[in-house]
C-alpha cells in the first residue's frame, strides 16, 4: 500500500480516523474528508509529524459538490486516486411509527447518497489505477434491526449499489469490498438520531465489550490489501450472517430480544 492515494470519508473519528492511521503507517497518502475541520487539521498534522503524507477537505458527503471537491483535493495534491473508503455514516434509534421521516431521509443522504456521490467522482480515476472502492456497511445491512430502520435501509441500499458496481466492472479490474462490522466502539451511537432528529447523546450499549475502531481498521486494511469482496467482523456479526441464511425467523427473534434489553429501548 506504500504510495497509494487513499480517500477516507468520515475520517474525523471512529473507524475513519483509525483507517487513516492504519494506511498512513503503511506509507499510503491520505486524503481526509469529514465535516469537523478542526479534527481533520489535527489528524492531518499528526500524520505528517509522524512522517506520513496527509491532506484534508472539509466535506459533508450528503452534499454532492463537497464529494466532488474531496476527490479533486486528492487529484490536485497527488495526481491519482487508488482507494476510496466510503466510511461516513450516521445512525438512528426510534420506532418507525414514532420517527420523523426527515430522519430517515438524512440517513439515506449520508449513508447511501454520500457513497454514490463520492464513488461517482472517484470512479474514473480509480479505474485508471485498477484500484479499490470500499463501503463500510454493518450487520444492520445483513438483517434489518428494529429501531434502526433508517440505518438498516441505508446499509441494504449501500450493499446493492456496491454489488452492482462490482459486477458492472468485472472486466475493468475494479476491486469492490463491502465490510460488515458488528457493534463497534465508536461515537456513532452518541451521535445517533432520535425520533425528532436530535442526537441521543449517550450510547445504549456497553462500548467496552465491543470491537475497537482500530481492530476494524486493521482487518479492513488487510481485506483491501488482499482484494477481498466481503469481510464480516466480530463473532456476533458472523453469527448473524450464518443464521440469516439458514434460520431467518429465529434470527429475528434473537435480534428483537437482544435490542429490547438496551436501556430505554423503544420496544420491549
Image (spheres, rainbow, N blue to C red):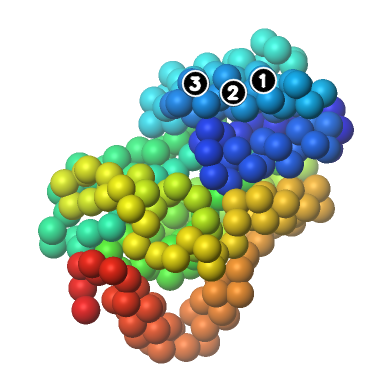
Out of 20 and 76, give the one closest to the viewer: 20
- Residue wearing tag 2: 42
In the picture of the structure, the residue carrying the numbered disc 3 is 38
Using the image, tell me which numbered label, if any, was put on residue 197: none
Residue furthest out toward the top: 76
3 or 1: tag closer to the N-terminus: 3
The residue that label 1 is drawn on is 45
**Mark 1 and mark 2 in contact (Cβ < 8 Å)?**
yes
In depth, the one of 48 and 5 nearer the eye is 48
Distance between mark 3 and mark 2 Cα atoms:
6 Å
What kind of element bears circle 2?
Answer: helix
Pinpoint residue 227: horizontal percent, then vertical percent: 77, 51
Question: Where is residue 209 drawn, in percent x and y?
Answer: 53, 68
Quadrant in which the C terminus appears:
bottom left
The reply to whether callout 3 and callout 2 are in contact (CB within 8 Å) is yes
Label 2 to label 1, Cα distance in Å? 5 Å
Please name the residue shown 44% across and 30% down the image.
61
For label 2, the crowd category at 10 Å Cα-Cα, with few meaning under 14, some 14 to 19 and many 20 or more, is few
- Cα–Cα span, label 3 and label 1: 11 Å
Determine the residue positioned at 44% across, 19% down. Answer: 65
Q: Position of residue 244 (x, y in %)?
A: 49, 79
List x then y, in percent, for residue 42. 59, 23
Question: Could you tell me if residue 236 is visible in this image?
Answer: yes
Horizontally, is 186 left or right of 129 in the view?
left
Residue shown at 35% from the left, 38% from the top: 109
> Horizontal placement of 148 versus 215: left or right?
left
Q: In this view, does 24 lie to the left or right of 262?
A: right
Amino acid at each position: 500500500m506504500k504510495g497509494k492515494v487513499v480517500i477516507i470519508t468520515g475520517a474525523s473519528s471512529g473507524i475513519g480516523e483509525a483507517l487513516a492511521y492504519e494506511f498512513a503507517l503503511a506509507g499510503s497518502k491520505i486524503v481526509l474528508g469529514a465535516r469537523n475541520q478542526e479534527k481533520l487539521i489535527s489528524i492531518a498534522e499528526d500524520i505528517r509529524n509522524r512522517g506520513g503524507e496527509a491532506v484534508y477537505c472539509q466535506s459533508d458527503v450528503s452534499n454532492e459538490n463537497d464529494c466532488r471537491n474531496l476527490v479533486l483535493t486528492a487529484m490536485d495534491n497527488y495526481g491519482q486516486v487508488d482507494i476510496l473508503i466510503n466510511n461516513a455514516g450516521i445512525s438512528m434509534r426510534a420506532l418507525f411509527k414514532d420517527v420523523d421521516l426527515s430522519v430517515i431521509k438524512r440517513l439515506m443522504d449520508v449513508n447511501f447518497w454520500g457513497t454514490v456521490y463520492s464513488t461517482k467522482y472517484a470512479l474514473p480515476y480509480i479505474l485508471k489505477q485498477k484500484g479499490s472502492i470500499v463501503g463500510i456497511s454493518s450487520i444492520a445491512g445483513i438483517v434489518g434491526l428494529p429501531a434502526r430502520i433508517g440505518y438498516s435501509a441505508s446499509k441494504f441500499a449501500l450493499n446493492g449499489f456496491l454489488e452492482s458496481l462490482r459486477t458492472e466492472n468485472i472486466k475493468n479490474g475494479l476491486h469492490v469490498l463491502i465490510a460488515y462490522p458488528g457493534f463497534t466502539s465508536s461515537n456513532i451511537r452518541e451521535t445517533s438520531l432520535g425520533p425528532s432528529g436530535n442526537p441521543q447523546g449517550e450510547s445504549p450499549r456497553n462500548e467496552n465489550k465491543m470491537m475497537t475502531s482500530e481492530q476494524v481498521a486493521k482487518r479492513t486494511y488487510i481485506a483491501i490489501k488482499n482484494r477481498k469482496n466481503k469481510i464480516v467482523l466480530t463473532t456476533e456479526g458472523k453469527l448473524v450472517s450464518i443464521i440469516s441464511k439458514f434460520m431467518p425467523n429465529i434470527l429475528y427473534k434473537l435480534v428483537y430480544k437482544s435490542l429490547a434489553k438496551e436501556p430505554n429501548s423503544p420496544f420491549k
